């Protein structure tokens, strides 16, 4: 019975680890979604700013104004590249957290399977004991009737 208690403890620990890994995975997914939204916002802002540049060029703009637009677009491109790196890192974190969760889940499932096997084995032993007692009872009854 002590091993059964130890197995229950292992199952509980594995379940807690799986729950924690699932929480970390959820946080990583949310963080990645946030970084992707920021990247999309930067890309949209760049497109809008580029449209303003084209409109300004069509209306006629000074060389200094054009240069300012170009410098700002370069800064936006740098920010977009940086944000893309952040998105990539967030995706790597999701992958890492998913692997950790899957590992924890496999461990929990294996402990559950082991516990089920132990329970089935104990049930078979109990059934054999019951059958033996019933057989002995039937034999005694048959001997008693003679």
Image (cartoon, rainbow, N blue to C red):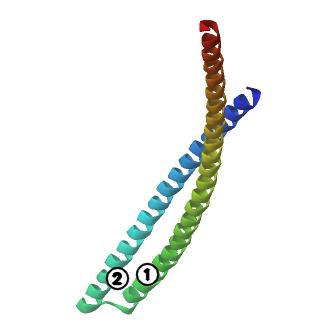
Residue 137 x %, y %: 62, 14
Q: Viewed as shown, does residue 14 lie left or right of 6?
A: left
Q: Looking at the image, which residue sits at the far left? A: 59
Q: Which one is nearer the viewer's eye here, 76 or 96?
A: 96
Give the residue displayed 60% in from the left and 13% down from the top: 142
Q: Which one is nearer the viewer's eye here, 101 or 36?
A: 101
Residue 107 visible in rendering:
yes
Give the residue displayed 32% in from the left and 84% down from the top: 53
The residue pinned by badge 1 equals 73
Disc 2: CA contacts within 10 A as few (<14), some (14-19) or many (>=20): some
Q: Find residue 96 and report its image quarter.
A: bottom right
Q: Which mark is residue 106?
A: none
Considering the numbered disc 1 on the image, is that residue within a helix, a strand or a loop?
Answer: helix
Residue 17 visible in rendering:
no
Name the quadrant of the N terminus. Answer: top right
Name the quadrant of the C terminus. Answer: top right
Give the residue displayed 25% in from the left and 91% down from the top: 58
Give the residue displayed 66% in from the left and 17% down from the top: 136
Residue 45 x %, y %: 36, 72
Q: Find residue 95 and report its image quarter.
A: bottom right
Q: Is residue 96 above or below residue 58?
A: above
Mark closer to the chain start, 1 or 2: 2
The residue pinned by badge 2 equals 50
Q: Is residue 105 above or below residue 56?
A: above
Q: Is residue 111 above or below residue 81?
A: above
Q: Looking at the image, which residue sits at the far front? A: 146
Disc 1 to disc 2, C-alpha distance: 8 Å
Q: Is residue 136 above or below residue 144?
A: below
Residue 106 x %, y %: 61, 51
Considering the numbered disc 2 on the image, is that residue within a helix, a strand or a loop?
Answer: helix
Q: Are marks 1 and 2 in contact (CB under 8 Å)?
A: yes
Residue 40 x %, y %: 40, 69
């Amino acid at each position: 019975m002590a091993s059964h208690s130890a197995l229950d403890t292992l199952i509980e620990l594995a379940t807690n680890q799986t729950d924690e890994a699932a929480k970390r995975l959820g946080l990583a997914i949310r963080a990645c979604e946030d970084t992707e939204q920021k990247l999309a916002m930067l890309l949209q802002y760049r497109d809008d700013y580029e449209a303003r540049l084209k409109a300004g060029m069509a209306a006629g703009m000074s060389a200094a104004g054009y240069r300012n637009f170009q410098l700002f677009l370069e800064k936006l491109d740098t920010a977009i590249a940086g944000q893309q790196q952040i998105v990539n890192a967030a995706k790597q974190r999701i992958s890492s957290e998913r692997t950790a969760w899957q590992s924890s889940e496999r461990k929990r499932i294996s402990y559950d399977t082991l516990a089920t096997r132990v329970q089935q084995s104990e049930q078979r032993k109990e059934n054999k004991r019951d059958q033996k007692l019933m057989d002995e009872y039937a034999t005694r009854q048959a001997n008693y009737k003679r």
